[in-house]
Image (cartoon, rainbow, N blue to C red):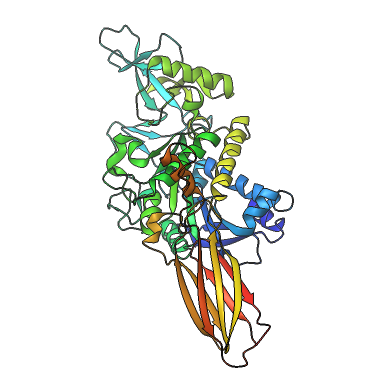
Amino acid sequence: MGVIENLVAISDGVCRSEVIGYSRSGRPLLLLTITEPSTPDTAKSGIWVDGDMHPSEVLGSTACLNLATRLVQGWNKDRRIQELLMHKVFYILPRWCVDAVDTYLTTPYYPRGNNSVAYEVVGRISLEDIDGDGIIREMRVPNPAGAWRISTLDLRLMVPRQPGDSGPFYDLFPEGRYHTHAKTEFDSFVDLNRNFPYQFVASYSSGPNPLSEPETAAVAQFIRSHPNIGLALNLHTWAGVILTPFANPEDSLTSGDQILYDYIAQVAKDTLGYPCIPGWKFSPAALGSRAGTFVDWLYQECGVLAMAVELWGPLRKAGVVSNYVDPMIPRSDQENKKFLDWLTNNIPNAVRSWQPFHHPDLGMVEIGGINRKFVLENPPPNSRLLQDEVEHFISFVLKLAEGLPLVRLVDCKMNWLGHHQIELQLTVENTGYWPTSVTKRAELILPPVTVTIRYADNIQTKWEVGNLDGYGVEHLLDWISGNGSSFRAIGRRRVSRRYRIRLPSNYRGPLEIVLSSPRAGLHRYTLHIKKC
Ligand SMILES: [Zn+2]
């Protein structure tokens, strides 16, 4: 039995799985829905978590499955989880880029985008595990005109050659076959995180059209049909940072939403130890290619409080450049040495010393270096480092999910006025931390909170309540006051309204009151009429 089938089987009905679509190669995209099952999931505030959108970032699926397991196991014994699953729903897609992940995990190759065929050419090298140790590392080849030399700090470390340096010098290549003529052809692949409609730019790696790929189309359709999703975490590796909208600096958040991300930044710092920055500040060198991201689309088109979570962060853990966010920033010899030492002390076999090898194209070379897949891109399987990372991630998710809105009819009074007339006084309150729409952006997109009163053959009257603040707003107002006490405005969290209703004569049936909101829950209340 697979991990997912097993989870569903032991879940007491709290967890179900469904296929939301199929990959290019026909593999199913399996989504887990985890919530207390007696209320429909769409009537609850939802949180979306996806893993393995990029095939080399498989810590995402591990984090997703550990989160799902925690929720399922907690349902019977953990008060906190029970409370969450009563009023919220988790939608978890552990493995998004299913075809290419399979290749990543079962071969030495590094598939790109959503293509399971791994054919990567770097300059004249096509990546191959030449020495058959199962890992594509690096090769160095002696060359008096080479651009690299051995570090004076560590014999395993290669550093860029500067004018005036003394040799020996080397060429440095990824491990693979060497071609005398540079190959120019590309394998065809689409980076799923460039294939979303917002600010989409067609290119060989973003696809011909937005949502051209079956994997992205399936997810977009699911999310569009679930406006109850207010919060979304899109998992990646390996920088150790939270990325918020937008990927391009000319876009800006809807007024009022920055405070939500400020709160997320605080939770991320406390639980994961990561900084939280807008996407455009991350890897500025790659900025031009960051249109059409999932997170930007979630926020802009769906009003979802969305973020990319770049898990792991081995450089940060090694204490290399404490404010490090950009994998493309060149590091100093000392920093590389510090990182290598941390790896050596914390991950067995993370780094292999250079070993001579007879290369079919290049003659004698040396092969060595870091195990990129399970040291840089992901923590080693079954390691303490992996467990710690997943544990911190779960704390982060649970804390955020607990803030989701929940509207309730907190008071309902009825007075008889005579002549078949009644007066109702209804009070509605958001008991969550976030506003009922979660984001200000969503207020422009989704219908507001509404109360519908039904009686006698479907006569109905509607009260458009609008959006309600969460209690988090008070912290903001308090913060603005600056003195901690004198300015505790309560925001618009609780509203009341009186209704006069003339009932048909001799009507003795109940009044049904339905409080509905796209992403803050649904509350039904039946008022029985005793006197007429
Ligand atoms: Zn990624």
Q: Which residue ends up furthest to the right in the rendered image?
A: 77
The reply to whether residue 355 is visible in this rendering is: no
Report the front residue among 230 and 48.
230
Q: In this view, does 172 lie above or below 124?
A: above
Count of numbered labels shown in the rendering: 0
Q: Residue furthest front?
A: 418
Q: Position of residue 153 (x, y in %)?
A: 44, 10
Q: In which quarter of the image is the C terminus?
A: bottom right
Name the foreground residue: 320 vs 278: 278
Q: In this view, does 94 lie to the left or right of 245?
A: right
Residue 364, image quadrant: top left
Image coordinates of residue 151 in percent, x first then y, are: 40, 12
**Quarter in which the N terminus is drawn:** bottom right
**Where 125 falls versus 115 (above or below)?**
above
For image coordinates 25% across by 10% down, the residue present is: 163
230 and 178: which one is in front?
A: 230
Q: Is residue 362 left or right of residue 420?
A: left
Can residue 495 be seen here? The reply is yes
Q: In which quarter of the image is residue 444?
A: bottom left
- Which quadrant of the view contains residue 482? top left
Of all residues shown, which one is farthest toward the bottom? 505
Q: What x and y, as percent, mark residue 448? A: 44, 66
Q: Position of residue 330 (x, y in %)?
A: 35, 24
Q: Residue at (53%, 20%) from the top-left corner? A: 342
